[in-house]
Amino acid sequence: MNEPISSSNYEQFSPEEIAGFDADDAHAGAAIGKMLTIFFLYTVVAMAGSSVATWYWIVNSTVR
């Protein structure tokens, strides 16, 4: 059997590494937020364009 790992005062990461992880996490969160914003705006523009195109095709097909 394996011996249980005792909890000691040993820290797995130094305070500098933890600060670096926090900074990297904040940077990644900001990048993901920007990507989601761009994808949302693209979806709104694409849906507006397809709605206008559909309306245009319906109006012009009933006139003839």
Image: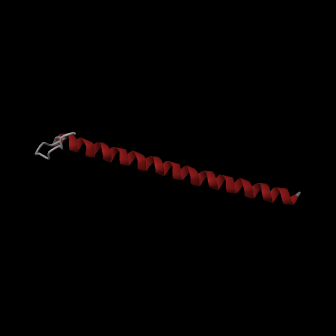
Residue appearing at x 74%, y 58% in the figure: 55
- Viewer-nearest residue: 14 or 10: 10
Image quarter for residue 2? top left
Determine the residue located farthest toward the right in the rendered image: 64
Which colouring convention does the figure follow? secondary structure
| Residue 8 point in image, percent of width and height | 11, 45
Determine the residue located farthest toward the front in the rendered image: 1
| Residue 33 point in image, percent of width and height | 42, 50
Residue appearing at x 36%, y 44% in the figure: 28
Q: Quadrant of the C terminus?
A: bottom right
- Viewer-nearest residue: 6 or 24: 6
Residue appearing at x 68%, y 53% in the figure: 50
Q: Is 30 positioned to the left or the right of 7 in the image?
A: right
- Viewer-nearest residue: 52 or 4: 4
Determine the residue located farthest toward the left in the rendered image: 9
Q: Quadrant of the N terminus?
A: top left
| Residue 51 point in image, percent of width and height | 68, 57
Q: Is 44 positioned to the left or the right of 10 in the image?
A: right
What is the total number of numbered labels drawn onto the structure image?
0
Q: Is 30 positioned to the left or the right of 57 in the image?
A: left
